[in-house]
Amino acid sequence: MKVYSAVIERCPQTGLFVGFVPGFPGAHSQGGTLDEVNHNLHDVIAMLLEDGEPMLESEFVGVQNVAVA
């Protein structure tokens, strides 16, 4: 089992959660709840992996807080 890190944002216009896997072309989806976007991302990633292991364009490292006065 491989685990991918996804970035999740909420669209201010629709209120939907939008998720994507950094560096993994095509690995993006949306949903009305966090569980739904996770399920949808799972399905998309599984479908993309049917074509073989991807060459990731970048590696997710993490997030940082940046304080600006």
Image (spheres, rainbow, N blue to C red):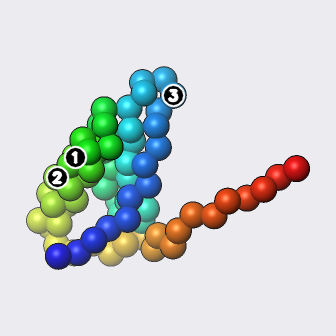
Residue 46's quadrant in the figure?
bottom left
Instruction: Name the image quarter holding residue 53.
Output: bottom left
Residue designated by label 2:
43
Give the residue type at disc 1: Asn
Distance in Å between CA atoms under marks 1 and 2: 5 Å
Q: Please, which residue is most extreme toward the left here? A: 50
Dot 2: what SS?
helix
Real-space CA distance between mark 3 and mark 2, rounded to the nearest whole angstrom:
25 Å
- Residue 59 in the image: above or below residue 8: below
Judged left or right of residue 51, residue 30 is right
Residue 4 in the figure: left or right of residue 2: right
Seen from this angle, which residue lies furthest right? 69
Residue furthest to the top: 13
Tell me residue 7's x, y (percent).
44, 55
Q: Which residue has dot 3 on it?
A: 12
Q: Which residue corresponds to the image point at 38% horizontal and 53% vertical from the top-left?
A: 20
